[in-house]
């Protein structure tokens, strides 16, 4: 377990003396995020801490879970080179103690923009062009991670940024990346249940049944939401367990039923992403993007 650390701007400044104009920009989940300027460029500084139950005594083995998540996040950013995955900043993974409390921190390139949850509230439903653009960019990020046999596991609107400068989409937060080649990595349930794939709920066999298609399913949920404003599995659900049951067993209505102006071919792409069986989704990112290009060529409908 992790908890959000309590830090002041002055404490962050003491940890990162090369930074200026430090401001808190986000807290929640399990991270505290500040931003600041280093050598004329803006970066995000992410801080994490173990839960109090993990810190026992001065010589305890501190924050194994926290450090492993941070290491996965940093390693993935260092491995992957795509403009649609957040990049590592100049401060590598470090640990420190603030007022006797252990923390870990690192830096990322700061993305100027809005996450999709905020953007949807402010700007309304995505146009078909924007949906296709989103799908291209985030599937490219999924593919870059999958080249290293890794799965993101937490693709959701809050983890996707739309850049203000050019409208590109960038995938954030690799702390829950699942490495199929790391036999020591726990397979306990993690992520955001509303965006689970069916196979993410198969806790005993996920190492054998999960691959990039799991991330494509989550992308399908995001695309459905951005197209209709409605979560495909949560509309009538009142509990998380009901949502999970719907993900496992219920086929939602086609997004074109909720939004008639949506191109039928694009609705079919989204519904294929939401297939319960991974084998019924796209067998490669290349084939998925080929389908997107076919949607793009229908100039009279998109």
Image: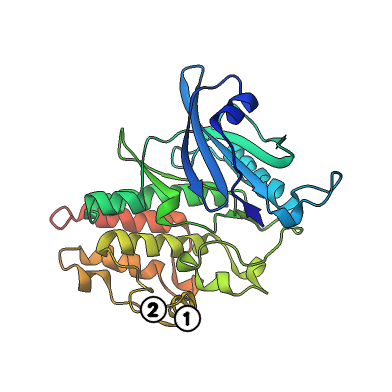
Q: Quick check: can you spot residue 202?
A: yes
Q: Quadrant of residue 91?
A: top right
Q: Quick check: can you spot residue 139?
A: no
Q: Around disc 1, counting alpha carbons within 10 Å, would you say few (fewer than 14), some (14 to 19), or many (20 or more)?
A: some
Q: Secondary structure at mark 1?
A: helix
Tell me the quarter of the image containing the C terminus.
Answer: bottom left
Residue 94 versus residue 189 in the image, above or below: above
* Percent x, y of residue 220: 39, 63
Q: Counting residues from the N terminus, which is met first, the one under dot 1 or under dot 2? A: 2
Residue pointed to by mark 2: 237
Tell me the quarter of the image containing the N terminus.
Answer: bottom right
Q: Residue 131 versus residue 44: which sits nearer the camera?
A: 44
Residue pointed to by mark 1: 245
- Identify the residue at horizontal 51%, vertical 35% (top origin): 34
Q: Secondary structure at mark 2?
A: loop
Residue 31 versus residue 125 in the image, above or below: above
Between the residue at mark 1 and the residue at mark 2, the CA separation in whole angstroms equals 9 Å
- Identify the residue at horizontal 41%, vertical 49% (top origin): 160
* Percent x, y of residue 246: 43, 79
């Amino acid at each position: 377990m992790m908890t959000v650390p309590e830090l002041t701007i002055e404490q962050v400044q003491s940890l990162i003396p090369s930074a200026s104009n430090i401001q808190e920009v986000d807290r929640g989940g399990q991270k505290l995020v500040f931003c600041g300027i280093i050598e004329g460029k803006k970066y995000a500084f992410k801080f994490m801490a173990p839960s109090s139950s993990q810190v026992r005594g001065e010589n305890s083995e501190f924050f194994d879970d926290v450090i492993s998540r941070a290491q996965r996040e940093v390693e993935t950013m260092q491995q992957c080179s795509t403009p649609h995955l957040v990049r590592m900043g100049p401060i590598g993974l470090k640990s420190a103690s603030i007022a006797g409390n252990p923390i870990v921190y690192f830096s990322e390139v700061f993305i100027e923009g809005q996450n999709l949850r905020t953007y949807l509230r402010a700007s309304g439903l995505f146009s078909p062009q924007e949906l296709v653009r989103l799908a291209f960019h985030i599937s490219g990020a999924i593919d870059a991670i999958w080249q290293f046999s890794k799965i993101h596991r937490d693709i959701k609107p809050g983890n996707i940024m739309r850049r203000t400068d050019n409208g590109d989409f960038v995938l954030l937060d690799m702390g829950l990346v699942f490495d199929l080649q790391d036999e020591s990595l726990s397979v306990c349930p993690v992520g955001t249940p509303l965006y689970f794939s069916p196979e993410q709920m198969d806790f005993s066999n996920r190492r054998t049944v999960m691959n990039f298609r799991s991330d494509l399913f989550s992308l399908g949920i995001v695309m459905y939401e951005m197209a209709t404003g409605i979560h495909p599995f949560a509309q009538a659900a009142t509990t998380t367990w009901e949502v999970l049951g719907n993900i496992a067993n219920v086929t939602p209505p086609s997004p074109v039923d909720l939004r008639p102006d949506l191109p039928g071919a694009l609705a079919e792409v989204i519904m294929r992403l939401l297939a319960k069986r991974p084998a019924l989704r796209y067998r490669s990112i290349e084939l998925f993007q080929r389908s997107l290009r076919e949607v793009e060529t229908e100039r009279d409908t998109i």
